[in-house]
Image (tube, helix red, strand yellow):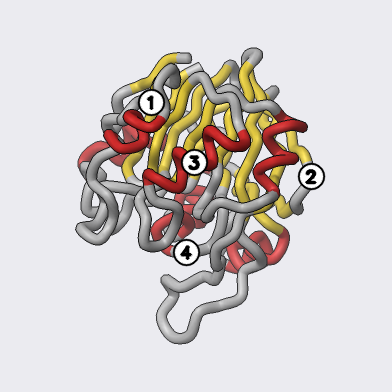
Amino acid sequence: MKLIWLGHSGFRIESGDAVILLDPFLTGSPVFPHAKRDEAIKGATHVLLTHGHGDHASDAAPISRELGIPVYCIHEMSIILGKDGAETVGFGKGGTVDLNGVKVTMVNATHSASIDYKGGDPIYAGQPAGFMIEAEGHTIYVTGDTDVMADMEWMGELHNPDIGIIAAGGHYTMDMKRAAWAAKKYFNFKTIIPCHYKTFPLLEQSAQPLADALPGVDVIEPEILKAIEI
């Protein structure tokens, strides 16, 4: 399995016959190399979205139309993106979908979730979410944009993820200190990949505080378009 960071909270997840674009924020991203867009989306089979904010969802419909692939997201957002010409599959928290052999369960997150990139007032787009992704004997917890929450206790016990893709840039989500506390309190991660940081000046620029707080956990600061092989 390969986890390839696309900057911010975007990842390309390759496993078997599945190539999943998770929250692919490419257009307008200040950190993604735009000349590499074709490389980033080539061969993708699915788009997976945690919520509707522009730094997560604004490229979803264009990619769906261009590649002819479905977008999986919470029900309300699937309706809106469908009106933009995207092929969509809506599901809800607790629901599990099979993406070419990769099983994805939607779980809770605490954040806001409107579509805010169309101009005018924000559009209601359901609730924010995270995901538990099962593939090749691993379970990846994608936190989505969230703070620490009590739900992490049962999610850690029920799903027992060994890999965390954790939004930890602060200001809009947990910062590195809070993410480290949650990781120690609720999970038994072997590997953590921080995200939702470095993109903008108001976000944290280094994951070193996270690594320092979690001895024994492999905290990997990802590099854009460089594969992390699990």
Q: Tell me which numbered mark, 1 or 4, is placed earlier along the sequence.
A: 4
Residue beneath disc 4: 53
Q: Is residue 125 above or below residue 200?
A: below
Among the 4 quarters of the image, the one containing residue 69: top right
Q: Give the x, y percent position of residue 75.
A: 72, 60
Residue beneath disc 1: 219
Residue beneath disc 2: 95
User: CA–CA distance between discs 2 and 4?
Assistant: 22 Å
Q: Secondary structure at mark 3?
A: helix
Q: Residue at x 68, y 26 (%)?
A: 160
Pair 1/4: label in front: 1
Q: Tell me which numbered mark, 3 or 1, is placed earlier along the sequence.
A: 3
Mark 3 and mark 2 in contact? Answer it, CB < 8 Å: no
Left or right of residue 27, residue 218 in this image: right
Q: Amino acid at mark 1?
A: Val
Q: Residues within 10 Å of mark 3 (few under 14, many from 20)?
A: some
Q: Give the x, y percent position of residue 90.
A: 72, 54
Q: Secondary structure at mark 2?
A: loop
Q: Tell me which numbered mark, 2 or 4, is placed earlier along the sequence.
A: 4
Pair 3/2: label in front: 3
Relative to the observer, which residue lies in front, 117 or 150? Answer: 150
Q: Residue at x 50, y 79 (%)?
A: 122
> Which residue is farthest bottom?
120
Relative to the observer, which residue lies in front, 117 or 7? Answer: 7
User: CA–CA distance between discs 3 and 4?
Assistant: 26 Å
User: CA–CA distance between discs 3 and 2?
Assistant: 28 Å
Q: How many marks?
A: 4
Q: Tell me which numbered mark, 3 or 4, is placed earlier along the sequence.
A: 4
Residue beneath disc 3: 181
